[in-house]
Amino acid sequence: MFRIVILGTGNVATHMFKAFQSTTDCSVIQVYNHKQESLTRFAEFTETTSDLSQLKSADMYLLCLKDDVIKDVASQIKTKQGIVAHTSGSQSILESLNSAVFYPLQTFSKGSELEYSKIPFCLEANSEENLNTLKTIASYISTHIYEISSSQRQTLHLAAVFVCNFTNHLYSIGEHICKEDDMPFDILKALIKETSDKVQLNPPSKVQTGPAIRKDSSTIKRHLKQLKQKTHKDIYQLMTQSIIEKHDKL
């Protein structure tokens, strides 16, 4: 059985804890956080600590931490045996002994239920032995495992910001526009689902619809006139122009 120590108690840490606890091949033997009060919800399931010097011996120390503290915390882990892996999409692999990356490409919220077996795990390690260990650990919770370099992972993270974070922000704008005219956002959810379903089977560029790809200038002008916030107008114009330019090249 692989012994794992998780450092962090945020969204990623919470889901990684649940994923590892769902398998009999891995055991989270300890959870660390610098704030003792953040460890309460883990304390009934495993040992916890707020002191880095008290970390238990483990096969992997999984750093589910903010990017700006990963390097500092990793440098304080006094181990010469366990793999020290971070879960960041944008940080390079650390230049230290037994350093690795164990990046789950997914959006995490503490209250959501996820099918961990379908989450892509992007792995990187500073030795073939450590990489093989990561692959074995990842295989217990997912069937989608990729050996990805730091450069490739950073590119994936950038793409993920567009398809996830920016898309969600557009949902938020759509919700705001609906509320301005006293309509429920729920009316749009069937459209959102169908749009998402289509890209599971087709290249996004092949299923683009709407006034921009049709170059329907009268509708575009009317939409711009309807929009009340300058930022929303700017986004609409920029997205419209981007769609037109993209499809003029196809």
Image: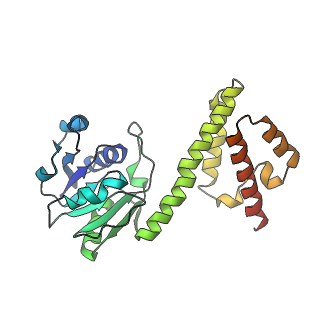
Q: Which residue is most to the right?
A: 218
Residue placed at 38% from the left, 66% from the top?
92
Q: Total number of numbered labels?
A: 0
Quarter residue 90 falls in? bottom left
Quarter residue 176 falls in? top right
Which quadrant is home to the C terminus?
Answer: bottom right
- Side (left or right) of 13 relative to 209: left
Residue placed at 31% from the left, 47% from the top?
13
Q: Which residue is most to the top?
A: 182
- Identify the colour scheme used: rainbow
Viewer-nearest residue: 62 or 188? 62
- Side (left or right) of 148 relative to 54: right
Residue placed at 41% from the left, 71% from the top?
149
Residue 207 appears in the picture as rendered: yes
Which quadrant is home to the N terminus?
Answer: bottom left
Viewer-nearest residue: 77 or 12? 77
Measuring from the top left, give residue 218's x and y in whole percent. 88, 45
Quarter residue 108 falls in? top left
Residue 140 appears in the picture as rendered: no
Viewer-nearest residue: 1 or 171? 171
Measuring from the top left, give residue 23's x and y in whole percent. 26, 51
Q: Which residue is most to the bottom?
A: 128
Above or below for 38 versus 134: above
Measuring from the top left, give residue 183's x and y in whole percent. 68, 26
Above or below for 202 versus 228: below
Measuring from the top left, give residue 186's x and y in whole percent. 62, 31
Above or below for 72 versus 48: below
- Side (left or right) of 91 relative to 56: right
